[in-house]
Image (cartoon, coloured by chain):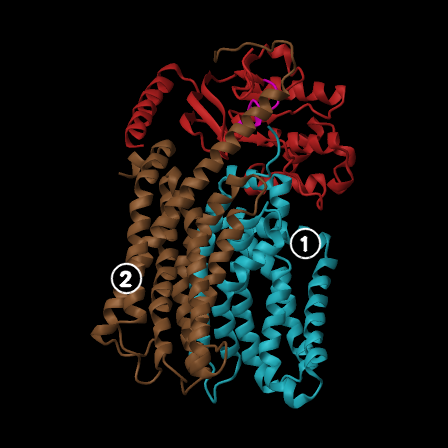
Chain colours: A brown, B red, C cyan
């Protein structure tokens, strides 16, 4: 299947076909999830209505981590098998995952203010998510940091692989740091016990976010492929207009 | 991709068989070279035997340097296969010299890296072959382009006899005397069974009657 | 093996040719350390508990400053091509670069810590474990620098990019390193030191292959 998709033109056609249904399904799921989240589920006995932020915060956090793993898989495909679309997929996923990480941080902060009284606390999970956000930004910066655009593909893929290996280490070290410096944990984020009536909106939002991620990545991959095509055409135009007017040498490659 | 891989595997097997049969020491078989996104050469096929010399010519952008780098293993060809059964010495666009060290130290360092030239005398001979003894003790950063080039080329005298020399514009920046020295060094190398492939605008070792591999700029407008 | 040693010797010879650069790193270290009391205030009661963490941060930033030099010269000079063509495997070359870089950047820092620490009122009881932890920490950081430099060489803002790549990866080293710098009552090998050493082992396993993969097809973007 991956070989079949490797042809960019073919992929763009498939992407065109897939995008609308995925986007509509994603929107539908999220809307249903929001209805359940905001209206048809109970408030937390401790936190009241602020717990409803969880329905955005938890799926966002999940997708942020999943996105990085997916990026790592693409990186593996690119480095080991040199699959041409893997590079595009990686570049497409990175900003999307970064945005989910940012969303997690923002919703975490909004959730925390009424609970902890501060806009930011150095809670273990939030800190790990912040560092994951840095990992994302690093990959994006590296992929786009070279004058010759495609030169950044291989380093970015290698960095994504290194990141995937290091995420568990970072998570472990932050947890370690957190327990040592804050022996009495103020709150266990996500410590709300999951009542079945809370599970429904969560699952809807989770599913919706997954599809939203897919839709965004498809869209971005298409845009990146078209961008590459434009650059190729520009390069060709530049070389052709550089030629002098009189005929040049003919060669064996007619 | 898998059928292409099968094709390449078949081609490799055929190539190996052909190489052994015709005792070509270097074989380029239908290679394509890409720089990033751009295809800069395709369908390139070329053989070289012991004692052979090929000059690679072509306009800027036709991929001369990239071809040499591909044969040197610094650039993977996008298609096709490159088979080389002898050691390779590469003098590229850059000199491979550290400006902070002097010419002699640079050569010693390089020789130790490759475990060539156990005797110091060989290094002196190599420096002498390119007439660089007078300034071998000066830090490379104060030397002119032509002087630096001589140390880069002196490496060639330290390598094994039946090696393939890949040279990128070797006589650029050299004066006439040094160019002739280089021609002589190349001649001797060919006589001992070595091979030379050089990308060059200028004439090189004409007495050896080199073969010409002319590259075209495939991205330019057709005539 | 000879080629490996020779690569280290070559880098040391080159570093010796511009040995004033080592002074620059040390000066950078001192200046950063000086910034802290100037920003925080000179009271020893405030500085003393912060001394160890601040020394770590200053050491990190000082070593960071030298990363873009790791492979830049070899790339620019075309030496990397020669290494790739030699019998020395690229990952061995990478390790040799790391060793030489640590000797030139990390070791002077380590030797300066007892003196520079005075500026932050560091307690002498802490010095032995601090220096040992920094020994491992600077080695780990050098390996991270190898990763960062091999990936970002040739980029537009290579130095800044390397910092962006390395620092998030360096946070575990910082966390465990600072914790390992405090002497445990009685014992010499604290669990934190073991964790720090474990991170170093992981980096020893990851950095050479990653850097070798990054450098395998690197060139200086010159020529047609």
Q: In the image shown, does A217 or A178 lie closer to the viewer?
A: A217
Q: Main secondary structure of the magenta part?
A: loop
- Quadrant where the N terminus of chain A sits is top left
Q: Which circle marks residue C15 in the picture?
A: 1
Chain letter for mark 1: C
Stretch in magenta: B58-66
Q: Is residue B209 left or right of residue A70?
A: right
Q: Decide whether residue B91 is among the magenta residues.
A: no
Image position of A121 with respect to A248: above or below: below
Q: Do the residues labelled 1 and 2 touch (CB within 8 Å)?
A: no
Viewer-side label of 1, 2? 2
- The correct choice, above or below, for B221 with respect to A100 in the image is above
Q: Residue B94, position in %: x, y?
A: 64, 35
Query: Which quarter of the figure has residue A116?
Result: bottom left
Q: Residue at x 73, y 23 (%)?
A: B178
| B60 falls in the magenta region | yes
Image coordinates for residue A124, horizontal then vertical, percent: 42, 75
Q: Position of residue B96 (x, y in %)?
A: 63, 38
Query: Closest to the observer: B31 or A154?
Result: A154
Number of numbered callouts drawn: 2
Q: Which chain carries label 2?
A: A
Task: Name the disc covering residue A86, or none.
Answer: none
Density class for disc 1 (Cα within 10 Å; few <14, some 14-19, many ≥20) is some
Circle 2 crowding by C-alpha within 10 Å: few under 14, some 14–19, many from 20? some
Which residue is disc 2 drawn over? Answer: A32
Badge 2 marks a residue whose secondary structure is helix
């Amino acid at each position: 299947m991956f070989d079949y998709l490797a042809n960019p033109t073919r992929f763009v056609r498939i992407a065109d076909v897939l995008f609308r249904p995925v986007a509509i399904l994603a929107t539908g799921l999220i809307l249903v999830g929001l209805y359940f989240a905001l209206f048809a589920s109970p408030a937390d006995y401790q936190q009241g209505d602020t717990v409803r932020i969880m329905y955005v915060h938890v799926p966002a956090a999940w997708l942020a981590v999943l996105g990085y793993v997916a990026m790592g898989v693409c990186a593996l495909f690119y480095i080991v098998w040199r699959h041409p679309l893997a590079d595009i997929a990686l570049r497409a996923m990175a900003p999307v995952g970064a945005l989910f990480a940012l969303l997690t941080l923002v919703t975490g902060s909004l959730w925390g203010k009424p609970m902890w009284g501060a806009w930011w606390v150095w809670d273990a999970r939030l800190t790990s998510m912040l560092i994951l956000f840095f990992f994302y930004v690093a990959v994006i910066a590296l992929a786009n940091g070279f004058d010759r655009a495609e030169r950044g593909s291989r380093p970015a893929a290698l960095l994504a692989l290194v990141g995937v290996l290091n995420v568990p280490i970072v998570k472990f070290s932050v947890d370690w740091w957190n327990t040592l410096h804050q022996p009495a944990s103020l709150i266990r984020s996500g410590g709300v016990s999951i009542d079945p009536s809370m599970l429904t909106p969560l699952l809807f939002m989770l599913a919706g976010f997954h599809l939203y991620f897919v839709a965004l990545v498809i869209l971005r991959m298409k845009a990146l492929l078209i961008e590459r095509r434009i650059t190729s055409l520009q390069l060709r135009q530049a070389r052709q207009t550089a030629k002098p007017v009189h005929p040049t040498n003919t060669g064996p490659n007619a | 991709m898998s059928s292409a891989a099968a094709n390449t595997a078949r081609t490799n097997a055929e190539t190996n068989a052909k190489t052994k049969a015709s005792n070509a020491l270097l074989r380029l078989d239908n290679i394509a070279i890409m720089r990033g996104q751009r295809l800069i050469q395709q369908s390139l096929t070329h053989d070289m035997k012991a004692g052979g010399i090929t000059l690679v010519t072509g306009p800027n952008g036709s991929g001369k340097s990239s071809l040499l780098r591909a044969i040197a293993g610094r650039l993977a060809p996008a298609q096709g296969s490159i088979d080389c059964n002898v050691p390779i010495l590469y003098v590229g666009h850059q000199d491979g010299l550290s400006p902070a060290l002097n010419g002699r130290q640079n050569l010693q360092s390089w020789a130790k890296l490759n475990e060539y030239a156990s005797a110091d005398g060989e290094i002196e001979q190599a420096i002498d072959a390119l007439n660089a003894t007078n300034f071998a003790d000066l830090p490379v950063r104060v030397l002119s382009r032509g002087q630096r080039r001589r140390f880069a080329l002196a490496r060639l005298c330290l390598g094994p006899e039946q090696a393939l020399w890949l040279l990128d514009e070797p006589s650029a920046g050299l004066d006439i005397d040094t160019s002739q020295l280089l021609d002589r060094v190349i001649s001797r190398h060919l006589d001992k069974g070595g091979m030379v492939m050089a990308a060059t605008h200028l004439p090189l070792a004409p007495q050896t009657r080199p073969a010409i591999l002319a590259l075209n700029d495939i991205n330019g407008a057709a005539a | 093996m000879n080629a490996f040693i020779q690569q280290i010797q070559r880098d040391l010879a080159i570093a010796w040719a511009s040995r004033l650069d080592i002074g620059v790193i040390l000066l950078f270290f001192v200046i950063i350390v000086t910034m802290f009391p100037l920003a925080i205030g000179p009271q020893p009661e405030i500085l003393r508990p912060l001394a160890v963490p601040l020394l770590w941060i200053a050491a990190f930033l000082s070593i960071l400053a030298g990363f873009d030099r790791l492979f830049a010269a070899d790339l620019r000079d075309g030496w990397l091509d020669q290494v790739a063509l030699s019998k020395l495997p690229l990952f061995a070359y990478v390790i040799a670069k790391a060793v030489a870089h640590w000797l030139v950047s990390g070791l002077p820092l380590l030797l300066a810590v007892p003196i520079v620490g005075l500026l932050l009122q560091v307690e002498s009881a802490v010095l032995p474990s601090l220096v040992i932890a920094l020994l491992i920490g600077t080695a780990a950081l050098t390996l991270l620098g190898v990763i960062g430099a091999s990936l970002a060489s040739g980029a537009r803002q290579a130095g800044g990019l390397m910092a962006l790549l390395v620092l998030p990866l360096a946070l575990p080293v910082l966390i465990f390193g600072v914790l390992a710098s405090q002497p445990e009552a009685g014992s010499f090998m604290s669990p934190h030191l073991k964790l720090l050493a474990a991170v170093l082992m992981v980096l020893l396993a990851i950095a050479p292959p990653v850097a070798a993969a990054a450098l395998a097809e690197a060139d200086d973007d010159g020529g047609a």
